[in-house]
Image: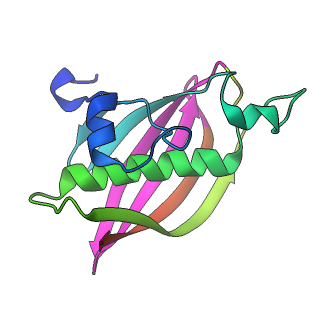
Amino acid sequence: MANELNSFDIQEILKLLPHRYPMLLVDKVVDHKPGEYLHAVKNVTANEPIFTGHFPDQPIFPGVMILEAMAQATGLLGFKTVENRSDNELYLFAAIDNARFKQPVVPGDTMHLHVQFVKERRNIWKFSAEAKVDGNVVCSAEIMCARREF
């Protein structure tokens, strides 16, 4: 069960992530525990610009966008895990391994993004990630991010 003290809204997400519309792909965080896990939500809506070309007659949310949403969730977990971080820090994709797509995501779906911290070594962070719709896994991957200061 989610704890309201461990959740945060779009305003907190905007403070942590540099992404903005149309590339911001996390709507809210339902639950998290720094250094362990984060559960976020992405509401997929028919008016998103990606659907004008992917695909006009059969809209499907692109797999690469699902991976990006999961990566943004890992960034949020990373930012919430590090104390006394610099405002000039970013988490950048370093690797995606074992990505699997199980079923399409379409307008009207609510994606639940579940990420777990696996390990950190020399500012490279490894996470296990899943995206679920209606309790079913639609995508899973191992994601590595590099923590960098600019």
Residue 2 percent across, percent down from the top left: 27, 24
Compared to 15, does 75 lie above or below?
A: below
Along the horizontal axis of the image, is 66 left or right of 9? right
User: x%, y% of residue 53?
Assistant: 82, 38
- Residue at 65% x, 18% y: name it: 108
Taking the view exactly as shown, the residue that stands out farthest to the right is: 57
Whole-percent x, y for residue 7 in the image: 25, 29
Q: Is-magenta flag for residue 132? A: yes
Magenta stretch, overall SS: strand
Q: Which residues are magenta?
A: 108-137
At horizontal 43% and vertical 66% (from top left) the residue drawn is 92
Instruction: Say if residue 23 shows up in the picture.
Output: yes
Q: Position of residue 88 (x, y in %)?
A: 25, 64
Q: Is residue 64 magenta?
A: no
Q: Residue furthest bottom?
A: 122
Q: Residue at x 67, y 22 (%)?
A: 47
Question: 34 and 52: which one is in front?
Answer: 52
Q: Quadrant of the C terminus?
A: bottom left
Colour scheme in use: rainbow
Residue at far top of view: 108
* Residue 104 seen in the figure: no
